[in-house]
Amino acid sequence: MKTPAIDALTRRLASQVVYQIFPERFAIGGGLSSCAKLADPAYDLPGAVKRDWDDTTLNQSWGQQFFGGDLDGITSKLDYLGDLGVTGVYLTPVFPAPSNHKYDATDFFSVDAMFGGEAALQRLIQALHARDMSLTLDAVLNHVSDQHPWFLAAQAGDLTKRDWFTFREDGSYLCWQDYGPMPELNLSNPAVRDVLYRDPDSLVQHWLARGVDNWRFDVAQDVGIPVAQEMSSIVGARFPHAGLLGELNGFSGSWFEAGGGFQGMMNYWYRTATLAWLAGEIDSVQMNHAVRDARMGYGLKGLLCSWNMLSSHDTPRLITSLGDAEKARLALLMQFTLPGVPLVYYGEEIGMEGGADPDCRRTMRWDPAQWNHAQRDWVKRLISIRQTNPALQYGEVTVLGDRLAGNALVFLRHTVVPGEEALVIVNNADEPLQVRLMLPYSHWYDGVPLRDALGAAPDTKVQAASVKLDIAPRSGAVY
């Protein structure tokens, strides 16, 4: 398998460590309490439930529970993220909407007053860029709120907006997953694509011009590959440094086979395989093949620019999913060493727990007494190892574990520069992995010493294109 040349944009995107924030639940700016913040008229919405920061997220009306997090709160915590080693922040939607999650926008060209408006967004952008951090915003091109002026006009019979949506003869309309408050946009209409991404003052281009660095696009399967290709061509011509990434809860190979679309996708494929393997639902043969399948299906560039995620605002949190902090450590080791961009969901670094939505959207814990400090130290260490090793950022991957007996994931990461390599072993067995591993790699010569960057496994060395491994049960090494 020939390794393709890595262009500058791919290298830059692949070298990120992205931290995902659900703005309503991360932090409140200005030192305000939830009670003080929620007194703002922006929260005077029908059905809104106002909560204290330490209240539960359960037993709520879907999307109507508010705790008061905002953009200035995020800005106030950037030193915390910088200390962790994060290089970029991804925010779920920030545009005006009647919900706490904002995936039902009523306006794509302003920032919700709950979050502080555009002035707060600009303060965040400036503070991020001053720290050489990037900002990724979340765009929903598939649907809007049923309170969006476009949809209200269409319902009222405005012929210029009627075919921006798809109405049936009985007056009903297509909506996202049959959820009435989210009518679907008709992306086959050129006027809709114009306002979303084709025109210079469109949604996507407007905010890139305002300092946003990258976009993540919700429900990519509903947006479609042709739209992604057209958008990438148009937007890339004006903003060649912008990263465009799609969400797809599955295997994304066809999105890269088509060519010319998003640079990366959210790598749910890795998440499913990682959690299933650590839970004993699949064996190491499937786990190793899952890594190889992604390399073959996504291509190296697509894989490197995709986000390796273990949890998000849509899924249970990591420790809750695995039920075990030791397994969570192995999952994080895989996340930071496999090809792709590590995506850390806020609070995972301190061991926050939470089940399915809305429980996975608990407020961030800022009291260090409530932190799992061992997990935070582990994440910080993994970030440091990754960011000081080019092979772990944008190197090729050669899968080796499926040639071994036992239950281990083994792979070699390497660039085209001799000396930029890392051999990763994750032993998910109850017994030590004590074996000689053949190494089909030309630049680790006989006698080359290998040391575990994690400091746990014994030193070893290359012996005639092979290496002797001695990895403890339920542990890993990064040589």
Image (cartoon, rainbow, N blue to C red):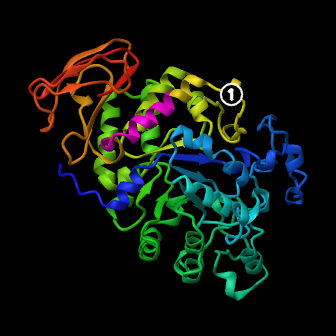
Identify the residue at horizontal 36%, vertical 57% (top origin): 10
User: To which quarter of the image does residue 124 belong?
Assistant: bottom right
User: To which quarter of the image does residue 259 belong?
Assistant: bottom left
The residue pinned by badge 1 equals 368
Q: Amino acid at mark 1?
A: Pro
Mark 1 Cα-neighbour bin, 10 Å: few <14, some 14–19, many ≥20: few
Q: Is residue 127 magenta?
A: no
What kind of element bears circle 1?
helix
Could you say which is closer to the camera, residue 341 or residue 433? 341
Question: Residue 31: x and y, percent?
Answer: 81, 44
Q: Is residue 50 left or right of residue 427?
A: right
Question: Chief secondary structure of the magenta span?
Answer: helix
Q: Is residue 152 visible?
A: yes
Residue at the front extreme, as displayed: 130
Q: Is residue 170 visible?
A: no
Q: Is residue 315 left or right of residue 364?
A: left
Establish if 39 lies above or below 380.
Answer: below
Residue at the bottom extreme, as displayed: 159
Establish if 344 lies above or below 262.
Answer: above
Q: Image quadrant for the C terminus?
A: top left
Q: Is residue 348 left or right of residue 245?
A: right
Could you say which is closer to the camera, residue 103 or residue 91? 91
Identify the residue at horizontal 56%, vertical 43% (top origin): 82
Question: Residue 143: x and y, percent?
Answer: 64, 66
Question: Residue 99: x and y, percent?
Answer: 76, 55
User: To which quarter of the image does residue 166 belong?
Assistant: bottom right
Identify the residue at horizontal 41%, vertical 74% (top origin): 233
Could you say which is closer to the camera, residue 378 or residue 131? 131
Question: Residue 174: x and y, percent?
Answer: 65, 67
Identify the residue at horizontal 59%, vertical 66% (top origin): 142
Q: Which residues are magenta?
A: 378-391
Q: Is residue 386 magenta?
A: yes
